[in-house]
Image (cartoon, grey):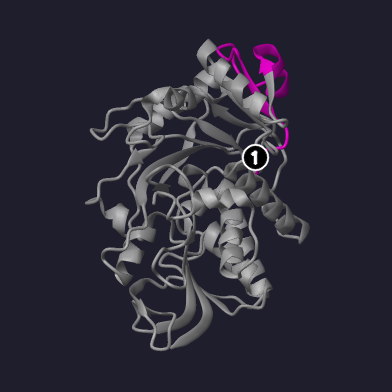
């Protein structure tokens, strides 16, 4: 049996950041995760950190992105080699409609600049002639997801956090003296005064262990990535995203209110594109977002490895080559997939669960958990500590629908 002031369920960037923040405040914290540090979406992404600066009308997204960048910078400043690179980001428009979307983004943020095609190619020479313009965000960055998860775990452990890797929660009930008691698959259990639920795509089924009627409104969404063989340094100077999907979703093509690439029948509705070059020379890209059916094993079991869909990889590769032709002939070295936690209304979930004392949720960050997750974890910790948080966090409360 273990005891702690707080148990954090989930050892991704959200849960580890929350544990670190709590431990720095003197709280005794235990982190548990069914698949280990960074075993879920936190390590299965491209490592993009989109930091557009503070918008002219700041929103929660700005708080999460700028705050998370500051946390990654702190890790790097403290000596962790997370491959943090302030390389900037180009968002490539290939149509006039996409260029109009880019102009709107630049108008909303001082740190985002609208450029024509030639000027954008001066920033990122890999862009091809199909790119008619787009945005340049010099403050954006990237980092290695696996190294970042390890660094967050190490920072938390230096403050006294105990991380129990590969510890699957099998029961979740009120504790004998208040708080909560978590049962683990190995028969052990943990008593805690409070719980931070940061279990990513599996937050909803974990919450239902406490109460079958408890609704943490997240849905599991499949995503996949591919990587080339190592290419010469500087093949890509910046992170690169395409604007086709953003234009489609803004134009009403969001499916069930979510920014997905495929409808419920599995028919593709748009293409999504983002990627970068890693320090080792690999170029990594991804894009598909497909909602998993409730019966899909990967939707309920964090240990299930999603199967890569080769047709989607082919579409994404062709899209990448259209934006950056140099990638067209680069062989694929590896592919992988993961499951992302989207909130049903598309907005993050950060705050207490109504009617359940001592249960805090941090998640629902969709496809940008690595980008926004560390700050989401810090904010959840601050709420649990009774600290003031930015007013924008109110939009992430779980009772916002009430």
Placement of the N terminus among the 4 image quadrants = bottom left
Q: Residue at x 65, y 28 (%)?
A: 108
**Location of residue 36 in the rendering, given as x and y in whole percent from the top left corner:** 47, 66
Q: Residue at x 59, y 80 (%)?
A: 28
Q: Label 1: few (<14), some or many (≥20) within 10 Å? A: few
Front-most of 26 and 169? 26
Q: Is residue 234 above or below residue 34?
A: above
Q: Which residue is at a point 76% across and 61% down the rendered structure image?
A: 78
Magenta region includes residue 213: no
Asked if the magenta segment contains residue 132, the reply would be yes
Q: In the rendered view, would you say 313 is above or below 203?
A: above
Q: With respect to residue 231, does 180 lie above or below?
A: below
The answer to whether residue 202 is left or right of residue 18 is left
325 or 286, nearer to the observer: 286
Q: Which residues are magenta?
A: 115-143
| Residue 264 placement, left or right of 233 | left
Task: Tell me if I can see residue 273 in this picture.
Answer: yes
Q: 164 left or right of 134? A: left
Residue 119 percent across, percent down from the top left: 71, 15
Residue 282 vs residue 262, the one in the foreground: 262
Can residue 324 be seen in this snapshot? no
Residue 267's image quarter? top left
In this view, 191 is above or below 284: below
Q: Position of residue 321 (x, y in %)?
A: 51, 22
Q: Position of residue 348 (x, y in %)?
A: 49, 49
* Extreme residue in the front direction: 402
Which residue was labeled with disc 1? 58
Q: Secondary structure at mark 1?
A: loop
């Amino acid at each position: 049996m273990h005891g702690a002031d707080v148990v954090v369920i989930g050892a991704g960037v959200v849960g580890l950041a929350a544990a670190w923040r709590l431990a720095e405040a003197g709280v005794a914290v235990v982190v548990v995760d069914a698949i280990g540090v960074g075993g879920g979406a936190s390590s299965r992404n491209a490592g993009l950190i989109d930091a557009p600066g503070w918008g002219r009308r700041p929103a929660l997204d700005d708080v999460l992105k700028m705050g998370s960048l500051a946390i990654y910078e702190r890790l790097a400043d403290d000596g962790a080699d997370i491959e943090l690179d302030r390389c900037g980001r180009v968002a490539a428009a290939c149509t006039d409609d996409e260029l109009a979307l880019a102009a709107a983004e630049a108008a909303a943020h001082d740190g985002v600049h609208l450029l024509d095609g030639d000027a954008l190619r001066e920033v990122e020479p890999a862009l091809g002639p199909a790119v008619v313009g787009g945005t340049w965000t010099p403050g954006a960055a990237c980092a290695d997801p696996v190294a970042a998860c390890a660094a967050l775990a190490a920072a938390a452990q230096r403050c006294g956090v105990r991380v129990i890797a590969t510890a699957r929660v099998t029961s979740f009930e009120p504790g004998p003296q208040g708080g909560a008691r978590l049962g683990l698959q190995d028969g052990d259990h943990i008593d805690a005064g409070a719980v931070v639920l940061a279990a990513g795509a599996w937050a909803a089924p974990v919450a239902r262990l406490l109460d079958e009627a408890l609704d943490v409104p997240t849905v599991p969404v499949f995503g996949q990535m591919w990587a080339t063989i190592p290419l010469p340094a500087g093949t890509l100077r910046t992170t690169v995203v395409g604007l086709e999907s953003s234009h489609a979703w803004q134009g009403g093509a969001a499916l069930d209110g979510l920014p997905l690439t495929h409808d419920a029948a599995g028919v593709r509705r748009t293409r999504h594109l983002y990627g970068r070059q890693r320090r080792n020379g690999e170029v990594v890209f991804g894009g598909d977002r497909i909602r998993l059916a409730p019966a899909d094993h990967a939707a309920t079991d964090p240990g299930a490895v999603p199967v890569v869909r080769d047709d989607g990889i082919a579409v994404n590769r062709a899209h990448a080559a259209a934006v950056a032709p140099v990638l067209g002939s680069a062989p694929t070295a590896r592919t992988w997939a993961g499951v992302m936690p989207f909130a049903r209304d598309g907005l993050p979930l950060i705050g207490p669960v109504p009617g359940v004392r001592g249960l805090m949720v941090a998640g629902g960050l969709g496809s940008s958990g690595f980008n926004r997750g560390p700050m989401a974890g810090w904010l959840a910790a601050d709420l649990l500590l009774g600290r003031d948080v930015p007013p924008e966090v109110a939009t992430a409360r779980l009772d916002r629908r009430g």
